[in-house]
Structure formats: structure tokens, C-alpha cells
């Protein structure tokens, strides 16, 4: 299962670790994915969503 948000499409980012001597080694920043049960086409379905997207959805539900 890939580390991709089902709603926003966010993926892991890559970059460098930097030591005090400024040596660069590759590293990854993973997306904070949460498994959530949501209604998709009227049926409950488990979806992997980023924490940021989940927060946005909860705020939109409150406003509506």
C-alpha cells in the first residue's frame, strides 16, 4: 500500500540529512496518514487520509 493521501494526493517528500560537517545523506519525510471510515457513494469505506486533509474535512463539516 503506497503512502498517498486518498483526497489530496500528497506523497512523501525527499531531501537531505545534514550533519554538523554539512555532509548530505538522503532521507524521506512521510505523510501523516490516518485510516478513517468515511461515507463514499453512500457506503462506509476505509480510506487513508492525511491528518491535514482530515482536519480540513472536519472543519468544513462544522461550518456546513
Image: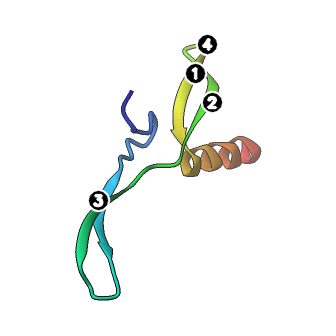
Camera-near label (3 vs 4) is 3
In the displayed structure, 1 sits above or below 55; it is above
Rate crowding at label 2 as few (under 14), some (14 to 19) or many (20 or more) other CA atoms within 10 Å.
some
Contact (Cβ within 8 Å) of mark 1 with mark 2 = yes
State left or right for residue 35 relative to residue 59: left
Residue carrying label 1:
46
Figure colour scheme? rainbow
| Separation (CA) of disc 1 from disc 3 | 27 Å
In the image: residue 16, left or right of residue 60: left
Closer to the camera, 19 or 61? 19
| Among numbered discs 2 and 4, the one appearing first in the sequence | 2
Residue 64 position, x and y percent, is: 72, 42
Disc 2 is placed on an element classified as: strand
The mark lying in front, picked from 2 and 3, is 3
Between 8 and 21, which is closer to the camera in this rendering? Answer: 21
Of callouts 2 and 3, which one flags the residue occurring earlier in the amino acid sequence? 3
- Mark 4 element type: loop
Q: Residue furthest right?
A: 62
> Which is more toward the observer, 64 or 54?
54
User: At x 40% / y 38%, what residue is drawn?
Assistant: 3
Residue, disc 2: 36
Q: Residues within 10 Å of mark 4 (few under 14, many from 20)?
A: few
Tag of residue 14: 3
Q: Residue at x 52, y 32 (%)?
A: 48
Mark 1 lies on a secondary structure that is strand
In this rendering, position of residue 21 left or right of residue 61: left
| Residue 26 % position (x, y) | 25, 63
Compared with 33, 15 (above or below) is: below
Please name the residue shown 61% across and 43% down the image.
Answer: 54
Badge number at residue 8 = none
Residue 35 image offset from top left, x and y in percent: 59, 31
Q: Residue 42 — which label?
A: 4
Amino acid at each position: 500500500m503506497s503512502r498517498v493521501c486518498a483526497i489530496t494526493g500528497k506523497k512523501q517528500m525527499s531531501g537531505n540529512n545534514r550533519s554538523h560537517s554539512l555532509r548530505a545523506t538522503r532521507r524521506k519525510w512521510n505523510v501523516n496518514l490516518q485510516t478513517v471510515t468515511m461515507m463514499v457513494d453512500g457506503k462506509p469505506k476505509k480510506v487513508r487520509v492525511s491528518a491535514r486533509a482530515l482536519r480540513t474535512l472536519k472543519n468544513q463539516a462544522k461550518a456546513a
